Image: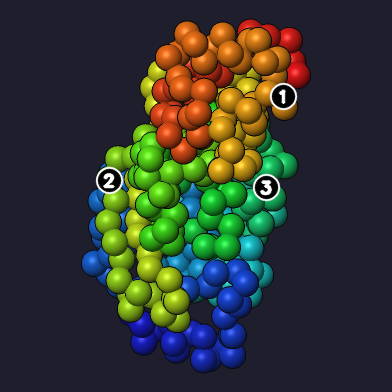
Amino acid sequence: MKLSEIRQILSERDLQLTRSLGQNFLHDARQLRRIVALAGVQPGERVLEIGPGLGPLTAALREAGADVLALEKDARLVAVLAERLHLAPEPGLPADLEGPAQPGRLRLVRADALRLLQREPECDWSGWKLVANLPYSVASPILVELALAERPPARLVVTLQREVVSRLNAGPGDAAYGLLTLLVRQRYQPAGSFRIPSDCFFPVPEVESGCIALDRCVPEPLTAPERRVFARVVKRAFSERRKKALKLLKYDWPAAALEAAWCELGLSPEARAETLSRDVFFELTRRLARLPAP
């Protein structure tokens, strides 16, 4: 979809884009092709798209043969997409999320994706890929919800603020390393990223953008009960970045158990959360998960 087409559609329907919904549409064909290539979309693969907007990425995914399920919050854009693509929006998630895929199919649902994921965490997305230009205002919460889901997608390929891409790629000691890094990467590993120039969007956003691919870890590093403990551990450890992680965790777990774990893992009592690797948090979680619930 060319920039001139986007302008024409918005003008003809007198649509004013909503900043709070993060409505900056990626229109550059080269960047759209790069996203589809990074996702490795194959004919017949099931793809979840969140925030299709006017459909430029949707069209690229269908051209690659994907079976696309698009979730769009804005009723105005749902109406435009339905008219342009000659389809009827569905009232909710299809019942056959695990059913046979149909190459080139598009199903459109008007839905607040973040609320839907929070309301239906048991949905089986394990045979899906998420490929989306996520609304920047809710991108991080959506990624966390998917990482905490019972059966999350096999691959996430998402356009985000460049700052968020940096957080997802960060390692211990990096300024960008933090809570988001660990909550997402408890289930996923970065698998490539690239920058997208601001002038590839309409309207041009005030922030830098990038696209990142994240692959689900196989086998899973933590069990479901351990993942719940892991989330508590990292949230507490990063709750006050200037304080020592050991001191913060003592609010929720017995001091003796924590000190024993610290000793077994060879950690300094002075260590702060941003210096501890994901694997260290995994090992700490496994030990704490064996204790009675705090």
Q: Is residue 84 left or right of residue 218?
A: right
Snapshot quadrant of residue 205:
bottom left
Instruction: Check disc 3 and report its element: helix, strand or loop.
Output: helix
Q: Amino acid at mark 1?
A: Asp
CB within 8 Å, label 2 to label 1: no
User: Residue at the spot x=52%, y=62% of the render?
Assistant: 136
Q: Residue furthest front?
A: 270
Instruction: Check disc 1 and report its element: helix, strand or loop.
Output: loop
**On screen, residue 47 above or below 79:** above
Foreground residue among 266 and 17: 266
Distance from the alpha carbon under mark 1 to that under mark 3: 31 Å
Residue 220 in sight here: no
Colouring style: rainbow
Distance from the alpha carbon under mark 2 to that under mark 1: 36 Å
Q: Position of residue 133 (x, y in %)?
A: 44, 60
Instruction: Check disc 2 and report its element: helix, strand or loop.
Output: strand
**On screen, residue 189 above or below 266:** below
Whichever of labels 2 and 1 marks the residue nearer the N terminus, that label is 2
Q: Position of residue 145 (x, y in %)?
A: 60, 41
Whichever of labels 1 and 3 marks the residue nearer the N terminus, that label is 3
Q: Amino acid at mark 2?
A: Gly
**Residue that mark 2 sits on:** 192
Q: For the C terminus, give its image quadrant.
A: top right
**Residue that mark 3 sits on:** 116
Count of marks overlaid on the render: 3
**Residue that mark 1 sits on:** 252
**On screen, residue 52 above or below 28:** above
Snapshot quadrant of residue 138:
bottom right
Foreground residue among 161 and 219: 161
User: Residue at the spot x=72%, y=42% of the render?
Assistant: 119
Q: Position of residue 245 (x, y in %)?
A: 57, 30
Q: Nearer the viewer, mark 1 or mark 3?
A: 1
